Amino acid sequence: MTNLFSIEYITIFTSFALLVLGLWGIISQKNIFKIIISFSIVNTSIHLLLVSLAYIRNRTAPIIDSAVDRVNAAEKVVDPVPHALVLTAIVIGIGITALMLSYAFTMYKQHKTLDINQYKSLKW
Amino acid sequence: MVSPIYIIAILLGMAFMLGLLSKSGTRIAGILTSVSLALPVYISISWFIQILSGNADAITIFTAGSVPPFSINLVMGLEEAFFTSAINILGLLGFIYLSADLKKQGVRAMALYLVLIMGLNVVVMTRDIFNLFVFMEIVTIAVAGLIYLKNDNQSKEAGFKYLVAVGIISLFFLIGIGFFYFYGGTLNIDGFIAANSVVVKGATIAIFFIIISIILELKPFPANGWALDVYQAATPGVSALISSGTATASIFVLYKLLPLGSEIWLQILTVVGAVTFLGSNFLGISQKNTNRLLGYSSIGQVGLLMMVIGFMPQLGSAFKMIFFSVFISHFLAKAGLFWLSGIVKKESITDWGILRGSNIALFLFGIFLFALVGFPPFPSFYGKWQMVMELAGTGRFIWIVIILLGSFFEGLYLFRWLGYAIKGEKSNEEKLQIPWDKIVPPFIFGISLFIAAYYANSMSVYGNTINLIPLVFILLLFVIDFLPAYIKNTITIGAMVYYAVNLYPSISDDTLRVVFAAIFLIGGILTMIAGYSVKGKRKGFFPFAVMMYFGLIGLIEAENLFQFFFAWELMTLGSYILIIRGKFSMKHAFNYMLFSLGGAYLIFLGIAMSSFGNTSLDIGIIGLSTMPGWSYTLLAIGFLTKTAALGLHIWLPGAHAEAESDVSPMVSGILLKGGVFGLIVLFLAMGGEQAASHPLLYSLGWLGAITALGGNLLAVFQEDAKRLLAYSSVANLGYILFALAFMTNIGWLSALTYSINHFLFKTLLFLAIGGVVLRVKTHNMYEMGGLIKQMPWSFIAVLIGIITLAGIPPLSGYAGKWLFYNAVITKGWYFQGVLVFFAGTIAFLYCFKLIYSVFLGQPKDRFRKVKEAPIWYLIPQFILIIGIMIFSARPDLVLKPIGALLTQSSYFPSDSLSWENVTASTNLGYWSGYKIMLVIGVMFAVLLVWLMYMSRKTQKVKQFNIVYAGERPFTPETTHFSHNMFSHYYKALGFLSAPLATRFWNITNDITHRIADGSKRLYTGNGQTYLAVIMAYIIIIYLIMF
Amino acid sequence: MELVKKIGFVLLGLFIILNWGLIMSGIIRKIIARLGMRRGIKVFQPYINLIKNYSIRSQISHGVMFYLGPVFRLSGGIGIFLFMPLIHGSELWSNFSFTGDLILIAYFAFFGMLGMALGAGEGGHPYSAIGISRGLAQFTAIELPLTLAIISIAIQYNTLSISEIVAAQQGGIQNWTLVTNPFATVAAMISFLGAMGHSPFSVVMAPQEIPIGPPTEYHGTFLGILQTNRAILHVIEAVLYMNLFFGGATNWGILILKSFLVYFWSVFVGMVFPRFRVDQSIPWLLKLPVLIGIIAIALLII
């Protein structure tokens, strides 16, 4: 754990970098698709974060197969719960992203523009 | 008992089933959906009832055959049962409301709807944080889908903003979950709490992300632009779901998750809630778009709920009741209003006049608004009261001010809206289409408000002291509103007589109360008699008239401050509706409401401050206030808004003048005495004579004197007869205030004499002039003239009225003047007194103008055939005249007992008026009303007989037979000297009547609205800005916390 | 029996006052004429006018209120007389002053004014209404110095009873309010000018522009009643001021002398000064006279 470049830190840093990048994208990009992509980046960064938090050094994936037997699985695998969470989160993320894209699509069909600054009919 | 898991099973199952149905099967699908929405209602309500009655305990449902932390568990406890019941009822009714739209979109939309309701149920019940996340996302997706239902440009835009904003928020939530699990080692909320993981330093960051995301879901000001857009753009049925449904679930989630965090979160929540409640309502005041306005209000209310939760420890055992009443008002009223908005289909609140097309809709609209603002007897009244009292108990006055200020702003825009609905322009071509499926849901919610009110009342600490029977009577009057007016009038009068007879024994030993009760009840009965002249049904009049009178009586009967305030608000509400009934009353009634609301909240604050450090709420605690300066001043200003002291008077002339003919005497002669009674209560609590040198009284004395002068001066320059009388009321209330402020025995005696007199002559004058106005159809005096021939009885009434008003002996007005002189000299307030006497002489000017312009001078051609005022107007007038005569001839009958009461009470022990038979004397002078009457009566009769003998051959001549340089005047119009009668006086003293107060309030109003309008531009409409604000919000809260 | 005696003396007093009023107005008009280098009317001309007016048999009426107006007016005048103690120390010449005090008289003055205004109003003549509107407007300002003065003397004597005020001034000129409270006296005497309706406050009747103002339409018996009233009212108002500020009267001779002098004060000023318009008189009255009145009170309370 002492090594700054160990896998845990790298993933956490990466996830943090992605988070910042994504958030920055969301508030700086004017194109709606780019915003959605930025959103996905944030999404991914969080998935990465979850997985990295679950990581325990020198352990393997929580899959019971030839490498891990049923009896001592608890000592050999990393925490399986976050992985399950990430799986679910990915699914949900896809759902949300899909919905966003479909909204973006219909918006584009109507106005022929993807510039978010053009969508200000509701305000104040 | 059906297991709550079936709620999920039924809803989810049906949602999948619907997918199997073909597109043509929408009809069947609709029925199936309704049934599957009805079952959860049954399940959750039965749980709620069983748990509440103690027949069942909260149950935990385990899934996947395992216990937490290895599985997800759901809990159905009392709170969960309550919230799921609310959500499921909303779901069912919302579906009925939306069914037409949903059918158009096909079965998939219905499936989406089912999923939404299912999601909300799970969000409430689950105890697993990740499960919570998942279902929140499901709700988000379902809502985003439903927003699309409207399928126009705006809704697409709003839907996208919503998705992105909520998407980002839930990502933060997800981060929080990650840390939550990392530090807590569990995803179970209870498990986390049990492990006491908060002490782990890193866990606070987990909690931060989790709670801040929930807070953001609740749309805190100002990070809520996306929500406003959604409220505005979505179809109102969906907005109702978002406002009442998802917000309900979210607020419960917040409540559920708060134990995770430390105490500091409660404080943060309080601040967030306060900022939201105040900010959102403030920005709302310049909003005209219906749904967006509702959005502002909705967000504000949720802010208030956050505040309530934040104050949980301070509110203690009262928390439940407060939360329930504030929540249920918001829940029912907001959904109801959104639904009504969907029926009316008007974008701007200024077009809501169309609502008048339906009585039911208008009625529902009214009660929803009243419930939101917090008028009694609706639940939020009890909630706000209790909350303010609890906060006051711990000295948190700043927070109270915030709550009241926010409520005031909310009242401002809601009542403006109500005004447009009741009085706004309405084109005749448009008809309000109300299909049954659109009106049933709001109707049920409207009725539920009353049920909720009943429960709030029974949960409230002082609720049991409220006499609910008159309220039921008022409700009954609504029910029988279809009957003709005279039947309802008779019932009302009967009820008032019955009430008066029953009331008398209980207050007969307190003359002060008897006097005011007589003014309120006898005055009420008399003015109601005039109502017999109204043909037709007079819809919506009687319930509110009774409400006003019951409120007034309630002031007298009140034993504690809660009852007092309850009655005060009831009176305000009733009188507001009465006033707004006038043809051109919209603006004036609105002004009245603003001042009344402001005044009521000042009173409220004053009461709260008085209660600080006191255990009871008896009226007497005002005097025990630990901050007497504040309490007294606030209460005094509050009461002065009702008595229309100069500066706070600008609502009065319009409100009184534009009201209906028989409403003007009610609100002028009678209602104003409510404020006087308030002042009396306050001054007595201050300690009567012992407090006579209090600086507040000194300033009130000056204020009263200036009011008297200003009111009379303004009255002189009026051309509108009723406005003239209205300004005269301002002045008379100034006299009363002045006399009360003496705080001496004789000063109070003169104040009470004035109150009685003002009631008698102002009711008389307003009835008489009202009767004339009914016939000539104009208020402008210069258009009338010479009506004495057509309306001799009205003339006599006005004559008696102005003699009394002017204080000319032998009528009772003189009693007031005489007592006044004595009081002024005894007290030593000479210069104020001189101002008041000066004002008194100015009153002659308008008295003359009134009677001359209307009844004397030159008759106009168009009024040659008008009839005498309706007999139903004359009857009360002559009863009042008899009253004046009795009071004039035998003032001792009334003044002796009052004097005795004042003297015997501990408040005014010094005796200054003594009676010898019918002669009253002070150490200054003496006066015998009876003998004066006798002397003048005999002399007048002798002279009259003599003149009749001397001029027995007098012949009557026609109109133009006057000494006019041998010519005949052209027309009555040019010969009737009335318009601008006192132009010379205006030239001399007109500068004193400059509308300074009006100008001041206009500018204040203007600036407030401009600031609100400017700040509103924070919501640029750009989705990206909204996101930036959300992120900034997180950062700021973070910085505040750490 | 007591009551009959009382009424007898009251009527006698009224008769004296009426005659003195008529003669006084004759004398005054004579003086005015002489000052204007005219010969003037006979001193008994007011009697002749009165008899003439009461004898006129052709009369017209504009309606009930028109008819009642003079009754109100005369009731007002006689009423003030009835409530006024005339001779100090005499129970018999105190009229009905036991029913009310100074305030009663101050307010009863309005009784006649109001009735008159209404009667004249029904006449339908615009000049009547103009006159009344001017009169009322000016009256508000005239009352103000008087109110201040009344309060001042009420503080000074600690009573509102006229008899007691008179009693307090007995024992020589040094005890008169004129000496003991000069500011109040000055304020009240200015107010008196307005009440009497001579120049500079004569715009109400303004013969040249609105022929005699309010009573324009009245004639015959009606006018006779109004003239009767004026004769009584002028004297009794002067008696009021005499009682309040000039030591009252202990016998009829002094009453006649003092009331003449008090009344003459208004005539004297009227001869010297031109007429104010209403919008001039009101600001004037509200400045210096009010200031004097305020000083009168301030001196007593400091």
Image (cartoon, coloured by chain):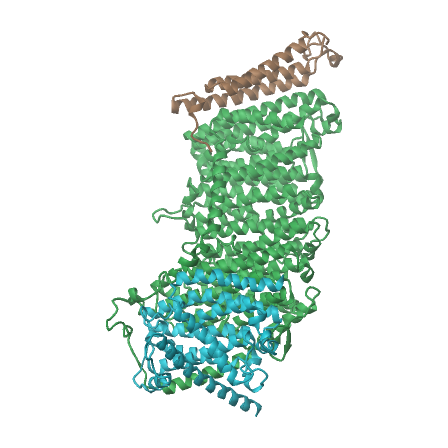
Chain colours: A brown, B green, C cyan
Give B775 or B796, whichever is nearer the viewer: B796
Residue B647 at x, y = what percent?
51, 52
Give B818 or C238, whichever is nearer the viewer: C238
Give B834 or B306, whichever is nearer the viewer: B834
Image vertical order of residue B537 relative to residue B323, above or below = below
Residue B490 at x, y = what percent?
50, 67
- Furthest-left residue in view? B967
Give B506 or B760, whichever is nearer the viewer: B760
The total of numbered circles placed on residues is 0
Quarter of the rendering containing residue A68 = top right
Left or right for B86, reference C191: right
Residue C126 at x, y = what percent?
32, 68
Q: Residue at horizontal 68%, vertical 59%?
A: B691
Quarter of the picture containing the N terminus of chain A is top right
Residue B516 at x, y = what percent?
59, 65
Image vertical order of residue C22 relative to residue B862, above or below = below
Left or right for C210, reference B16: left
Residue A91 visible in this rendered orientation of the protein: yes
Q: Residue at horizontal 70%, vertical 41%?
A: B314
- Furthest-bottom residue in view? C1
Image vertical order of residue B182 relative to residue B82, above or below = above
Residue B5 visible in this rendered orientation of the protein: no
